[in-house]
Amino acid sequence: MPKGRLPSPPPRKAFDSSLAIINIVLLLIFFFLATGSLLSSRTVEVALPETTRLPLDLLPSPLLVVATDGSMTLDGNPLDTGTLSVALGDSPILHVLADRDLPATTLLSTLDDEALIAVEVRLVTLHRNENEGEDSP
């Protein structure tokens, strides 16, 4: 090597991005596994009780009755829209008896408008008695 010359720099290696891509793919897989298991763990359970004969005064309390026109009564007392959570107080359970002809979307939107927090909603249904032609809870 002649005097006064600097040695030439070593040749640059090309950046290998395969390790970074593998890390990103693994992170995405772990993310989707974690969020998928979280979302699938939220289950909605609906248990519809059925009785053949029960006097109306023995229905569970508090009982919200929703008519076809959307009017509501709680344990026989009329309610205005937006006042259900106040009327319930500390009760963690609400029993709902909806009119047979009330569309499910109307019932769900009515309950959604009430902004119930931490309240378990149980549906009470009327069973049509074929022999007598009348409803019984």
Image: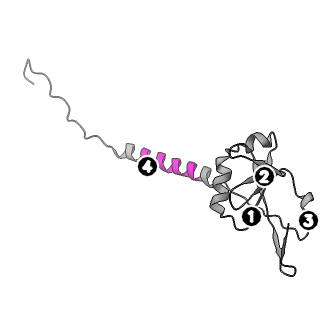
| Residue 73 - label | 2
Please state which amino acid type lies under the numbered disc 3.
Answer: Leu
> Are the residues at dot 1 and dot 4 in contact (C-beta closer than 8 Å)?
no
Where on the picture, by quarter, is residue 92? top right
Q: CA distance from mark 2 to mark 4?
A: 55 Å
Whichever of callouts 1 and 4 sits on the residue coming sooner in the sequence is 4
The residue where tag 3 is placed is: 54
Report the residue marked by disc 4.
25
Find residue 93 and report its horizontal and vertical position in percent.
Answer: 80, 49
Real-space Cα separation, disc 1 to disc 2, in angstroms? 12 Å
Q: Nearer the viewer, mark 1 or mark 4?
A: 1
Give the amino acid at mark 4. Answer: Val
Q: Earlier in the sequence, mark 1 or mark 2?
A: 2
**Label 2 vs 4, first from the N-terminus:** 4
* SS type, badge 1: loop
Q: Mark 3 to mark 4: distance in Å?
A: 60 Å
Q: Is residue 41 visible?
A: no
**Mark 1 packing: few (<14 Cα in 10 Å), some, or many (20+)?**
some
**In the picture, residue 55 is in which quadrant?**
bottom right
The mark lying in front, picked from 2 and 4, is 2
Q: CA distance from mark 3 to mark 1?
A: 17 Å
Spatial CA distance of label 1 from label 4 is 53 Å
Mark nearer the N terminus (3 vs 1): 3
The label on residue 47 is: none
Type of amino acid at the residue the image marks with label 1: Asp
Q: Which residue is label 1 attached to?
A: 99
